[in-house]
Image: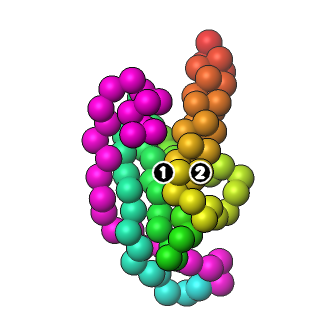
Amino acid sequence: QTVQERYGKPVDVQSADAEIRLFPDDRELTSVPVLYWEERGAHFVIFKVGEKNYRNQFFYSSREQFGTGREEYDEIGDCVITLLRVQADHESTRVIDKD
């Protein structure tokens, strides 16, 4: 619902799995459930890395990947809201930089 409020229309949020390193020193990848959506040229991912632990990122391409400056969240709502806010701020500066 938060995602739909941000864009003012229904957004197709998909469930999937991703392989990530849970810790920087991990050599093995771990499969975790994710929520994924695309909007306005940006791709968003919420990773569930524990019982109540979430990570996030948004990206435009493999060379343009961004986080929120916080490694983990214990509430999915906070994780989603912060991701949307940071991306909205980034989107506004990205438009300014292109002008």
Cα separation between marks 1 and 2 = 25 Å
The quarter of the rendered structure image containing the C terminus is top right
| Residue labelled with disc 1 | 62
Work out which residue is located at the far bottom of the displayed protein and give it: 27
Give the magenta part as a residue range.
1-25
The quarter of the rendered structure image containing the N terminus is top left
| Residue labelled with disc 2 | 78
Q: Is residue 74 above or below residue 78?
A: below
Q: Is residue 63 above or below residue 4?
A: below
Q: Label 2's element?
A: helix
The image shows residue 54 at horizontal and vertical percentages of 54, 64
Camera-nearest residue between 43 and 2: 2
Amino acid type at circle 1 is: Ser
**Going by the image, does 16 lie left or right of 84?**
left
**Is the residue marked by circle 1 packed among few (<14), some (14-19), or many (20+) residues within 10 Å?**
few
Does residue 42 show up magenta in the picture? Answer: no
Q: Residue at x 28, y 41 (%)?
A: 12
The image shows residue 77 at horizontal and vertical percentages of 53, 51
Q: Residue at x 65, y 84 (%)?
A: 25
Q: Is residue 1 visible?
A: yes
Using the rendered view, name the quadrant where residue 24 is placed: bottom right
